[in-house]
Image (tube, grey):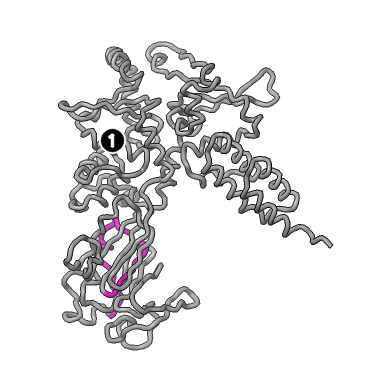
């Protein structure tokens, strides 16, 4: 057995020394005994319905069975088979669905609630006062998903007498929500999708760097279309003429049959990792997501579209990893997944439209290390946005990369701006710190960043974050340095104090002084 969790009136379980539970219950209803009315080593609680959740996501219950709180349908009521739930029994409806893995469970006096790995809640049992959260008065003898939580992910569930409460967080990668502005303004877009059908054609701009990082299907499709464009001179001429109205964007006509609102919702998911579409469009969005092999979006549409059952969308051709949906991952991994997807584009030459030139120290003649990047992503930072829009001298004097080569391959090469960064290292930003800044801007995942940085690199990163106005990153760096203080010697603590004083890191300065006072020998 894995984790054990229940909440009802007046129960106080005592934990055994090796992870077991020892507590009392109702002998008459089988709340303790695994089949006989005598002392037992089975985990149990003083309540009508003890619960257990195993490591593989199954729910076991035993005890009182009068109000459907076991979720076993119309059978096995106490008046029919009073001894059936004297043994722990698996909740079969949940166990039979490979897409549902329970991580914790809770119960009120006569109702049961299960938190699944994907951040949703299942409920069943007695429904007095609407405790099941299904918007109805009827009791439920089968597990049903709790709707009405909008696009929030549940992280904890608890229940008591005639009530249930959950703790939630917004669905999606929190940092990625800033990408919706990138999608909305369309600056530096290099794609335009033709959607809406023959009656209402719409042209929706997007960015290769994001859609290719987040969708393998779109990336493969664009490669095929690029190959066709290179080999078909007549098609290339048409594309060149049409692209003038969209400032050089590459047209994609493969989704003309898709509703514009549905396709916008799909792009919003790619850019922000969250579902944002009206409820009556979620079924269609789920079908389109299955068409383009976006497993995680399929699962979200299944979870949030109230009237459609799991079996109604396309067959599970999108299943992977031993017949389990790739979208049914723990909700806490969404930010990490978004970060991992975008990490593939950091310092990647693919689709890059700007190259930063970092001067190599002591190089004769002058040499630079090339750091490719993407304007669409960096434009989230006002510092870079101003640079690219021409507000900085670097943006005005940037050189445009010349295309070289012969034939159609040369004409398809993108213009790349080269921007020298002579001043960064003079302001205390190292090359590794600048690469760390790019990684943060692309992914927003501090865990990906901090795992490879030494304390000195963290200081450089703080300086760079402060210079670019990345206040969240600067705060995270400062907290990371504060956590390291107790492990430093006196000389290192003095260095941290000087650094904090120089760059106005007030929290680090205060904590450095406090730790330093504790380590200094007392003055006689």
Number of callouts: 1
**In the drawing, does residue 135 fall left or right of residue 404?**
left
Question: What is the magenta range?
Answer: 86-109
**Between 322 and 282, the one nearer to me in the picture:** 282
- For image coordinates 31% across by 18% down, the residue present is 243
Q: What element carries label 1?
A: helix
Mark 1 closeness class: few <14, some 14–19, many ≥20 residues within 10 Å: some
Q: Position of residue 391 (x, y in %)?
A: 50, 22
The x, y position of residue 520, in whole percent, is 77, 57
- Please indicate whether residue 12 sits to the left or right of residue 49 in the image: right
Kindly indicate the quadrant of the structure image that contains residue 498.
top right
| Residue 503, above or below 197 | below
Residue drawn at 44 percent across, 75 percent down: 20
In-front residue for pair 326/123: 123
Could you say where residue 308 lies in the image, as x and y percent from the top left?
Answer: 18, 51
Residue occupying image coordinates x 24% and y 41%: 285
The N terminus lies in which quarter of the figure? Answer: bottom left
State the residue position of label 1.
264
Image position, residue 322 (x, y; %): 33, 52
Check the picture and name the quadrant holding the C terminus.
bottom right
Question: Residue 13 lies in magenta, yes or no?
Answer: no
Residue 189 visible? The answer is yes
Camera sees residue 56: no
> Residue at point 72% right, 59% down?
518
Residue 403, relative to residue 134: is it above or below? above
Q: Does the magenta stretch include residue 101?
A: yes
- In this picture, residue 226 sits left or right of residue 194: right
Q: Residue furthest bottom?
A: 38
Residue ranking furthest to the top: 406
Q: In which quarter of the image is residue 75?
A: bottom left
């Amino acid at each position: 057995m894995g984790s054990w969790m229940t909440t009802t009136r007046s129960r106080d379980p005592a934990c055994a020394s090796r992870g077991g539970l020892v507590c009392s219950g109702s002998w008459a209803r089988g709340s303790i005994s695994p089949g006989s009315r005598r002392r037992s080593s089975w985990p149990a609680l003083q309540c009508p319905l003890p619960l257990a959740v195993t490591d593989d996501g199954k729910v076991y219950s035993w005890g009182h069975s009068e109000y459907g709180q076991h979720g076993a349908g119309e059978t096995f009521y106490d008046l029919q088979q009073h001894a059936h739930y004297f043994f722990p029994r698996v909740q079969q409806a949940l166990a039979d669905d490979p897409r549902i893995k329970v991580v914790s469970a809770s119960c009120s006096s006569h109702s049961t609630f299960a938190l699944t790995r994907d951040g949703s809640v299942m409920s069943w049992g007695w429904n007095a006062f609407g405790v099941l959260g299904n918007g109805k008065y009827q009791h439920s003898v089968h597990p049903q998903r709790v709707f009405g939580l909008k696009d929030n992910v549940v992280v904890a569930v608890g229940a008591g007498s005639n009530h249930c409460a959950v703790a939630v967080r917004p669905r999606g990668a929190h940092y990625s929500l800033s990408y919706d502005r990138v999608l909305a303004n369309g600056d530096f877009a290099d794609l335009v999708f033709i959607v809406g059908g023959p009656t209402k054609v719409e042209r929706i701009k997007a960015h290769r760097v994001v859609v290719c990082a987040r969708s393998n299907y779109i990336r493969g499709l664009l490669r095929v279309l690029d190959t066709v464009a290179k080999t078909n001179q007549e098609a290339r001429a048409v594309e060149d003429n049409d692209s003038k109205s969209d400032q050089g964007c590459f047209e994609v006509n493969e989704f003309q049959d898709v509703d514009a609102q549905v396709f916008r919702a799909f792009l919003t998911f790619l850019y922000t990792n969250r579902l944002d579409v009206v409820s009556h469009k979620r079924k269609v969005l789920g079908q389109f997501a299955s068409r383009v092999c976006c497993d995680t979006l399929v699962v979200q549409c299944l979870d949030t579209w109230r009237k459609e059952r799991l079996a109604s969308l396309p067959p599970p051709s999108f299943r992977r990893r031993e017949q389990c949906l790739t979208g049914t991952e723990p909700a806490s991994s969404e930010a990490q997944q978004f970060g991992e997807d975008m990490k593939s584009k950091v310092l990647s030459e693919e689709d890059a439209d700007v190259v930063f030139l970092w001067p190599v120290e002591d190089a004769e003649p002058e040499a630079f290390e090339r750091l490719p990047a993407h304007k669409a992503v960096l434009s989230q930072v006002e510092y870079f946005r101003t640079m690219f829009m021409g507000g900085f001298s670097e943006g005005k004097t940037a050189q445009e990369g010349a295309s070289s080569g012969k034939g159609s391959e040369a004409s398809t090469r993108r213009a790349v701006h080269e921007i020298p960064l002579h001043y960064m290292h003079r302001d205390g930003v190292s090359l590794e710190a600048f690469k760390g800044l790019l990684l943060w801007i692309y992914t927003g995942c501090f865990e990906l960043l901090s795992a490879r940085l030494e304390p000195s690199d963290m200081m450089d990163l703080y300086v760079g974050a402060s210079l670019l106005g990345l206040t969240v990153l600067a705060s995270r760096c400062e907290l990371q340095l504060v956590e390291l203080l107790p492990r430093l010697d006196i000389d290192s603590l003095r260095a941290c104090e000087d650094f904090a004083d120089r760059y106005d890191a007030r929290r680090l300065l205060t904590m450095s002084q406090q730790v330093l006072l504790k380590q200094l020998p007392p003055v006689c």
